[in-house]
Amino acid sequence: MAEMKIADIRAMSPDQMDDAIVNLKKERFNLRFQRATGQLENTARLREARRDIARIKTIAAQQRAKTK
């Protein structure tokens, strides 16, 4: 999964954002295990996944604040 774009995230519904976060957390978990066992080839993907999670959470918080 490539880095997520802001426009793509803003187009998501809150449920889709939650699903994306869950999927990214699972991916990050697997990437950590791959790194620990020396099987991880693209180490930058760990950073991308972490930042994608933060990006989604930030936009979700902004949207929640806007609706209040």
Image (cartoon, grey):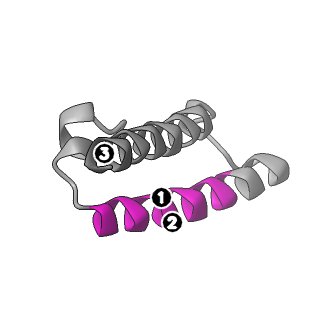
Q: Amino acid at mark 1?
A: Ile
Q: Compare residues 52 and 67 and report the one nearer the observer.
A: 67
Q: Which tag, 1 or 3, sits closer to the chain's start? A: 1
Q: Position of residue 25 (x, y in %)?
A: 58, 59
The residue identified by callout 2 is 22
For residue 6, above or below residue 29:
above
Residue 27 sits in quarter: bottom right
* Distance in Å between CA atoms under marks 2 and 1: 4 Å
Report the amino acid beneath label 3.
Answer: Gln
Q: Which residue is mark 1?
A: 21
Answer yes or no: is residue 20 visible. yes
Question: Residue drawn at (37%, 43%), measured in percent from left and top?
Answer: 65
Stretch of the chain drawn in magenta: 14-31
The kind of secondary structure element at disc 1 is helix
User: Mark 3 and mark 2: span between their CA atoms?
Assistant: 19 Å
User: Which label sits in the foreground, 3 or 2?
Assistant: 3
Q: How many marks?
A: 3
Labels 1 & 3 near each other (Cβ < 8 A)? no
Q: Is residue 1 visible?
A: no
Classify 10 Å Cα crowding around label 2: few (below 14), some (14-19), many (20 and above): few
Q: Which comes before the other along the chain, label 3 or label 2?
A: 2
Disc 2 element: helix
Please say whether residue 25 is one of the residues in the magenta stretch: yes
Query: What residue type is disc 2 on?
Result: Val
Instruction: Residue at 54%, 38% (x, y): give it.
Output: 45
Residue 18 image offset from top left, x and y in percent: 42, 64
Residue 55 x %, y %: 44, 36
* Cβ–Cβ under 8 Å for marks 2 and 1: yes
Which residue does the numbered mark 3 point to in the structure image? 63
